[in-house]
């Protein structure tokens, strides 16, 4: 209902796990008519869902239902234990013997290709991928802005949703790109290239955030070099300390 009331927007974003099921099932059922209308209208509508491959691997994904074929972003940095298990090949027989269901998400390709939305390209990030600026910068300079979605329901009424929003503010400033963030229960917001919150919805309440976003080009020093200057500085300090100790011994 809220989406249909806002079809005038250039891009519409649903949060992570907005459709908590396999997309290949809902596209033929509950969302069949909605997807058909989105493609007729050529509307970029991104929904958080589970994308299943032909070989039965599946991904935490953002799917653009307005494109034909679908535009799909597959989360590449998965949450340990929450989305995948270490040593899965070793643990799988044990789980089978204990009669415990065992399955996990598969990571998407890295670096991901920014998605073309209208005249511009959008970089993508799902959930805690926004913590890793060193990885996000690989979507530049092609990405003119970023779209990030999250499901903060896991953390309920804690400080984590606010902290996650602050992490996105830091990424926006470091990368020199605005961020549009959509969440289920956390903070949905639009953040400019200086890390300032331009528009924001209250947490834990349904709503629609309508806002204008200014795409950007160019590279900040961090986007260009990442953490190399910091590593060089730390290496220089370490080398200076070693040299000083050596000279004192003489």
Image (cartoon, grey):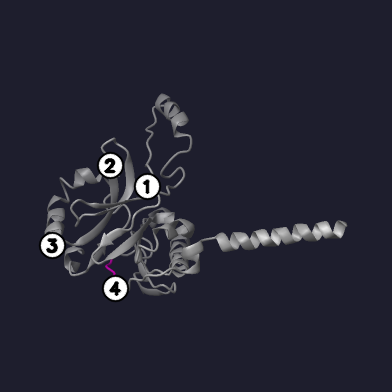
Residue ID at (47%, 60%): 133
Residue 195 appears at what percent x and percent y? 44, 72
Query: Is 99 located above or below residue 17 in the figure?
Result: above
Instruction: Give the alpha-carbon distance from disc 1 to disc 4, as whole Å.
Output: 30 Å
Q: Residue at x 47, y 67 (%)?
A: 174
Find the distance from the CA under tag 3 to the CA under tag 1: 30 Å
Label 1 or label 4, whichever comes before in sequence order? 1
Counting other residues with Cα less than 10 Å from the Cα at mark 1, is it few (<14), some (14-19), or many (20 or more)?
few
- The residue under the point 47% across, 58% down is 131
Q: Which of marks 4 and 3 is nearer the N terminus?
A: 3
Whether 152 is drawn above or below 189: the answer is above
* Magenta segment main secondary structure: loop
Q: Which of the two marks, 3 or 1, is nearer to us in this view?
A: 1
Separation (CA) of disc 2 from disc 1:
15 Å
Disc 4 from disc 3: Cα separation: 21 Å
Alpha carbon separation for disc pair 2 and 4: 32 Å
Q: Which mark is residue 41?
A: 3
Q: Does the magenta stretch include residue 224?
A: no
* Identity of the residue drawn at 23% across and 65% down: 118
Mark 3 vs 1: CB contact within 8 A: no
Q: Name the residue under label 4.
A: 211
Q: Label 2's element?
A: strand
Report which residue position mark 2 lands on.
Answer: 52
Q: What element carries label 4?
A: loop
Q: Tell me if mark 3 has few (under 14), some (14-19) or many (20+) residues whose alpha carbon lies within 10 angstroms of its own.
A: few
Query: Which residue, given by chain and number where applicable, does mark 1 sit on?
Result: 109
Question: Residue 188, percent across and down?
Answer: 35, 66
CB contact under 8 Å: marks 4 and 3: no
């Amino acid at each position: 209902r809220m989406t249909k009331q806002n079809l005038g927007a250039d891009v519409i974003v649903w949060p992570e796990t907005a459709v908590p099921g396999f997309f290949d099932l809902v596209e033929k059922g509950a969302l069949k008519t909605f997807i058909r209308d989105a493609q007729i209208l050529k509307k970029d509508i991104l929904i958080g869902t589970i994308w299943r491959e032909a070989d039965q691997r599946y991904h935490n994904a953002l799917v653009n239902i307005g494109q034909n074929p679908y535009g799909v972003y597959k989360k590449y940095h998965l949450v340990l234990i929450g989305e995948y298990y270490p040593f899965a090949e070793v643990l799988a027989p044990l789980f089978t013997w204990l009669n415990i269901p065992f399955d996990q998400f598969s990571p998407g390709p890295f670096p991901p290709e920014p998605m073309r939305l209208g005249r511009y390209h959008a970089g993508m990030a799902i959930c805690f991928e926004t913590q890793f600026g060193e990885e996000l910068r690989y979507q530049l300079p092609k990405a003119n802005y970023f779209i990030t979605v999250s499901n903060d329901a896991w953390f309920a009424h804690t400080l984590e949703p606010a902290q996650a929003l602050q992490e996105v503010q830091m990424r926006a400033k470091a990368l020199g790109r605005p961020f549009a963030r959509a969440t289920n229960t956390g903070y949905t917001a639009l953040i400019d290239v200086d890390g300032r919150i331009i528009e924001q919805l209250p947490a834990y309440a349904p709503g629609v955030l309508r806002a204008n976003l200014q795409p950007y080009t160019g590279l900040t020093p961090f986007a260009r070099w990442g953490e190399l200057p910091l590593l060089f500085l730390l290496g220089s300090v370490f080398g200076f300390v070693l040299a000083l100790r050596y000279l004192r011994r003489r």
